[in-house]
Image (cartoon, rainbow, N blue to C red):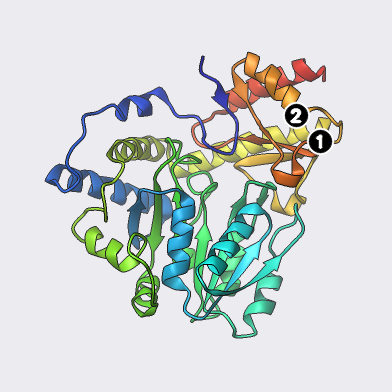
């Protein structure tokens, strides 16, 4: 029996998309694949709001986080950390032998433009890494305000993990001056996991040329070589690219502004319920529009709630890591609709007697 997912990923995938993945395969060096690649990339540029090159990777978003570090950090990077996934990017930098520092805030708090400015004024950094939407804490960082600060420092590349936000909220890559913006398939883009995409600026490509030990699989210069032939470095997950291309049609037909407004409406509905019966975990300034992290003020057993929800073919998420049972998470991203959120909340109310 299918269990509807209200978790931070993977998200719900429509039957139409699953059927698209059953199409016969084609050769990844064929003209047919190049046409599929070009079609997908042209649509992704609209979702990214960019004229930059778009690279497709047969990896998770984490793979492109590592690619970004290997290609874009010359001397030292600054990692902006407000939860697990920001911390992960920092660890990736260190494990690749890069000099890296961080701005770290308490769980539930977000990154402020002031803290970024203070660090960049030192002149110590040539790259900065931001997790836009932190699914471990429900924090969505103020990317437009942060970008305004970063863009004052000409030699600093701006890299953004938008894995759980792109396609659910507006991220205007070119307007924001983002040099690498990466995301993966299983969040707001609403297709199965296993593929990641990123936009890469000319500045980032120029930096990449000068950085040593970029490796091969995640070398932006190798990506570029194959991109110019409308292909990928190695055998891509063709079925998922079929799915992504089809889903992008759906996204663009819905209309990007309509999609962003739908995510906002679902978030507001979920937050209203959370504030009525529990409390929000993140500070109000940083509330996310793609998932809600709720403070477990009633001390409910989240695992028990999820067992009851499973009987109704639904699933939410417990808190992440040390926040397990202290919080719980309800995602409202991808192709979920307000009616789905209303049904979920109604059933939770019945189970908990609220």
**Residue positioned most to the right:** 298
Between 100 and 346, the one lying in front of the other is 100
Q: Is residue 301 left or right of residue 158?
A: right
Residue 310 picture location, percent across and down: 63, 19
Disc 2 on helix, strand or loop?
A: helix
Residue 239 picture location, percent across and down: 30, 35
Q: Which residue is mark 1?
A: 296
Please give the count of numbered marks on the rendered protein.
Answer: 2
Between 13 and 262, the one lying in front of the other is 13
Q: Residue at x 60, y 34 (%)?
A: 7
Q: From this view, report whether residue 238 is shown above or below residue 127.
A: above
Q: Is residue 54 left or right of residue 335?
A: left
Q: From this view, report whether residue 27 is shown above or below residue 69.
A: above
**Residue positioned most to the bottom:** 123
Q: Which circle's residue, 2 or 1, is located before the other in the chain? A: 1
Task: State yes or no: discs 2 and 1 in contact (Cβ < 8 Å).
Answer: yes
Distance between the alpha carbons at the discs numbered 2 and 1: 9 Å
Disc sitting over residue 192 in the figure: none
Disc 2 packing (10 Å; few <14; some 14–19; many ≥20): many
Residue 19 picture location, percent across and down: 33, 24
Between 335 and 164, the one lying in front of the other is 164
Q: Quadrant of the C terminus?
A: top right
Residue 346 picture location, percent across and down: 70, 19
Q: Residue at x 37, y 61 (%)?
A: 218
Specify the quadrant of the image occupied by residue 306.
top right
Q: Is residue 310 left or right of residue 259?
A: right
Q: Which residue is mark 2?
A: 302
Residue 262 in view (yes/no): yes
Disc 1 on helix, strand or loop?
A: loop
């Amino acid at each position: 029996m299918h269990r509807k997912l209200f978790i931070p990923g993977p998200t719900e995938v429509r039957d139409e998309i699953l059927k698209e993945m059953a199409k016969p395969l084609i050769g990844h060096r064929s003209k047919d694949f190049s046409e599929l690649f070009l079609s997908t990339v042209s649509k992704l540029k609209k979702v990214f709001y960019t004229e930059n090159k778009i690279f497709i990777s047969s990896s998770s978003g984490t793979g492109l986080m590592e690619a970004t570090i290997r290609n874009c950090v010359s001397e030292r990077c600054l990692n902006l950390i407000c939860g697990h996934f920001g911390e992960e990017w920092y660890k990736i930098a260190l494990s690749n032998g890069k000099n890296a520092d961080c701005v770290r805030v308490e769980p539930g708090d977000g990154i402020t433009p002031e803290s970024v400015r203070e660090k960049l004024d030192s002149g110590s950094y040539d790259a900065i890494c931001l997790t836009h939407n932190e699914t471990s804490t429900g924090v969505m960082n103020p990317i437009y305000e942060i970008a305004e600060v970063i863009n004052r420092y000409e030699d600093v590349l701006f890299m953004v993990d938008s894995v759980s936000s792109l396609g659910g909220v507006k991220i205007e890559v070119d307007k924001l001056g983002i040099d690498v913006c990466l995301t993966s398939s299983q969040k707001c883009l609403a297709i199965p996991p296993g593929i990641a995409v990123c936009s890469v600026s000319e500045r980032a490509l120029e930096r990449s040329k000068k950085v040593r030990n970029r490796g091969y699989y995640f070398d932006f210069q190798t990506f570029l070589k194959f991109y110019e032939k409308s292909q990928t470095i190695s055998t891509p997950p063709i079925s998922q690219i079929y799915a992504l291309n089809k889903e992008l049609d759906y996204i663009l037909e819905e209309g990007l502004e309509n999609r962003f407004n739908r995510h906002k409406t679902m978030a507001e509905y979920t937050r209203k319920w959370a504030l009525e019966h529990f409390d929000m975990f993140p500070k109000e300034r940083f509330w996310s529009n793609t998932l809600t992290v709720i403070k477990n003020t009633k001390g409910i057993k989240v695992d028990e709630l999820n067992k009851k929800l499973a009987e109704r073919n639904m699933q939410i998420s417990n808190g992440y890591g040390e926040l397990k049972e202290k919080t719980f998470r309800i995602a409202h991203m991808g192709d979920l609709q307000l009616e789905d959120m209303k049904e979920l909340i109604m059933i939770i109310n019945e189970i908990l007697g609220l």
